[in-house]
Image (cartoon, grey):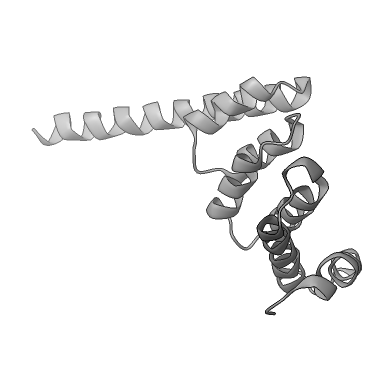
Amino acid sequence: MRKTFGIIILSIYIAVLCVFAAAEYFYQAGKADGDVEKIKIAAFLNPFVSDYRYEIFDQSNPKDIASIKEAIRLEPLKASYHMFYGLELLRDYSKRTRASDQIAFHEIARAYALKPYSAQYKQIYEHDAKPYIVNP
Protein backbone atom coordinates (compact mmCIF):
# COMPACT_ATOMS: atom_id res chain seq x y z
CA MET A 1 0.00 0.00 0.00
CA ARG A 2 2.76 2.45 0.95
CA LYS A 3 4.78 1.64 -2.16
CA THR A 4 1.75 2.19 -4.41
CA PHE A 5 1.02 5.54 -2.76
CA GLY A 6 4.62 6.64 -3.27
CA ILE A 7 4.52 5.65 -6.93
CA ILE A 8 1.28 7.59 -7.43
CA ILE A 9 2.75 10.72 -5.79
CA LEU A 10 5.93 10.41 -7.87
CA SER A 11 3.86 9.99 -11.06
CA ILE A 12 1.82 13.11 -10.26
CA TYR A 13 4.99 15.07 -9.53
CA ILE A 14 6.53 14.02 -12.85
CA ALA A 15 3.31 14.88 -14.72
CA VAL A 16 3.22 18.39 -13.17
CA LEU A 17 6.87 18.94 -14.05
CA CYS A 18 6.18 17.90 -17.63
CA VAL A 19 3.24 20.31 -17.89
CA PHE A 20 5.34 23.19 -16.51
CA ALA A 21 8.18 22.29 -18.89
CA ALA A 22 5.74 22.32 -21.80
CA ALA A 23 4.47 25.71 -20.65
CA GLU A 24 8.01 27.09 -20.61
CA TYR A 25 8.65 25.63 -24.06
CA PHE A 26 5.56 27.31 -25.50
CA TYR A 27 6.48 30.58 -23.77
CA GLN A 28 10.01 30.62 -25.14
CA ALA A 29 8.86 29.59 -28.63
CA GLY A 30 6.08 32.18 -28.66
CA LYS A 31 8.37 34.91 -27.41
CA ALA A 32 10.99 34.09 -30.07
CA ASP A 33 8.43 33.89 -32.90
CA GLY A 34 6.22 36.73 -31.69
CA ASP A 35 3.33 34.25 -31.58
CA VAL A 36 0.82 35.32 -28.94
CA GLU A 37 -1.16 32.08 -29.29
CA LYS A 38 1.81 30.00 -28.10
CA ILE A 39 2.22 32.28 -25.10
CA LYS A 40 -1.50 31.91 -24.34
CA ILE A 41 -1.00 28.13 -24.33
CA ALA A 42 1.86 28.59 -21.87
CA ALA A 43 -0.35 30.75 -19.63
CA PHE A 44 -3.07 28.09 -19.78
CA LEU A 45 -0.65 25.30 -18.86
CA ASN A 46 0.92 27.27 -16.00
CA PRO A 47 -1.44 29.97 -14.74
CA PHE A 48 0.90 31.00 -11.90
CA VAL A 49 3.56 32.84 -13.93
CA SER A 50 2.97 36.58 -14.29
CA ASP A 51 5.59 36.94 -17.05
CA TYR A 52 3.42 34.87 -19.37
CA ARG A 53 0.53 37.29 -18.86
CA TYR A 54 2.76 40.33 -19.34
CA GLU A 55 4.17 38.92 -22.58
CA ILE A 56 0.62 38.35 -23.90
CA PHE A 57 -0.11 42.01 -23.15
CA ASP A 58 3.15 43.20 -24.68
CA GLN A 59 2.90 41.25 -27.94
CA SER A 60 -0.81 41.53 -28.63
CA ASN A 61 -2.16 44.18 -30.96
CA PRO A 62 -4.34 45.82 -29.72
CA LYS A 63 -2.97 45.47 -26.21
CA ASP A 64 -4.73 42.86 -24.08
CA ILE A 65 -5.62 44.84 -20.94
CA ALA A 66 -7.03 41.76 -19.20
CA SER A 67 -3.62 40.08 -19.39
CA ILE A 68 -1.76 42.93 -17.69
CA LYS A 69 -4.44 43.08 -15.00
CA GLU A 70 -3.94 39.36 -14.43
CA ALA A 71 -0.16 39.86 -14.27
CA ILE A 72 -0.73 42.52 -11.60
CA ARG A 73 -2.98 40.15 -9.68
CA LEU A 74 -0.31 37.45 -9.78
CA GLU A 75 2.57 39.77 -8.86
CA PRO A 76 1.20 42.97 -7.30
CA LEU A 77 4.59 44.32 -6.20
CA LYS A 78 6.07 44.49 -9.70
CA ALA A 79 6.18 48.21 -10.48
CA SER A 80 6.58 47.82 -14.24
CA TYR A 81 3.23 46.04 -14.54
CA HIS A 82 1.44 48.94 -12.84
CA MET A 83 3.28 51.48 -14.99
CA PHE A 84 2.51 49.69 -18.28
CA TYR A 85 -1.14 49.27 -17.29
CA GLY A 86 -1.50 52.94 -16.39
CA LEU A 87 0.24 54.17 -19.53
CA GLU A 88 -1.82 51.85 -21.74
CA LEU A 89 -5.05 53.20 -20.21
CA LEU A 90 -3.91 56.73 -21.04
CA ARG A 91 -2.68 55.79 -24.53
CA ASP A 92 -5.93 54.25 -25.80
CA TYR A 93 -7.88 57.42 -26.64
CA SER A 94 -10.88 55.56 -28.02
CA LYS A 95 -11.66 53.96 -24.64
CA ARG A 96 -10.67 56.79 -22.28
CA THR A 97 -13.12 57.95 -19.65
CA ARG A 98 -12.70 59.93 -16.46
CA ALA A 99 -12.81 56.71 -14.48
CA SER A 100 -10.17 55.01 -16.64
CA ASP A 101 -7.98 58.11 -16.41
CA GLN A 102 -8.19 58.06 -12.61
CA ILE A 103 -7.32 54.36 -12.58
CA ALA A 104 -4.37 55.11 -14.86
CA PHE A 105 -3.14 57.94 -12.64
CA HIS A 106 -3.35 55.76 -9.55
CA GLU A 107 -1.57 52.88 -11.28
CA ILE A 108 1.26 55.22 -12.29
CA ALA A 109 1.40 56.55 -8.73
CA ARG A 110 1.51 52.98 -7.40
CA ALA A 111 4.35 52.11 -9.78
CA TYR A 112 6.31 55.14 -8.60
CA ALA A 113 5.62 54.24 -4.96
CA LEU A 114 6.95 50.73 -5.58
CA LYS A 115 10.06 52.01 -7.36
CA PRO A 116 10.75 55.52 -5.98
CA TYR A 117 14.45 55.43 -6.87
CA SER A 118 13.71 55.28 -10.61
CA ALA A 119 14.22 58.63 -12.34
CA GLN A 120 12.08 57.51 -15.26
CA TYR A 121 9.16 56.50 -13.03
CA LYS A 122 9.44 59.77 -11.13
CA GLN A 123 9.37 61.77 -14.36
CA ILE A 124 6.31 59.91 -15.66
CA TYR A 125 4.56 60.29 -12.31
CA GLU A 126 5.34 64.01 -12.03
CA HIS A 127 4.29 64.72 -15.63
CA ASP A 128 1.39 62.34 -16.26
CA ALA A 129 -0.23 61.49 -12.94
CA LYS A 130 0.49 63.77 -10.00
CA PRO A 131 -1.27 66.88 -11.34
CA TYR A 132 -4.47 64.93 -12.01
CA ILE A 133 -4.89 62.72 -8.94
CA VAL A 134 -8.06 63.84 -7.17
CA ASN A 135 -7.64 62.08 -3.82
CA PRO A 136 -3.96 61.12 -3.32
Compared across the picture, whether 2 is left or right of 78 comes to left
Q: Quadrant of the N terminus?
A: top left
Q: Nearer the viewer, residue 123 or 25?
A: 123
Answer with the quarter of the image where residue 129 lies.
bottom right
| Residue 71 shows in this picture | yes
Residue pushed farthest left?
Answer: 1
Counting from the top left corner in percent of width and height, residue 84 is at: 76, 51
Compared across the picture, whether 83 is left or right of 7 comes to right
Answer with the quarter of the image where residue 125 lies.
bottom right
94 lies above or below 115:
above
Residue at screen point 76% across, 29% down: 61
Counting from the top left corner in percent of width and height, residue 23 is at: 55, 28
Q: Nearer the viewer, residue 4 or 17?
A: 17
Residue at screen point 71% across, 21% down: 35
Residue at screen point 67% across, 36% down: 64
39 lies above or below 100:
above
Counting from the top left corner in percent of width and height, residue 135 is at: 67, 79
Residue at screen point 75% across, 73% down: 133
Q: Nearer the viewer, residue 110 or 50?
A: 110
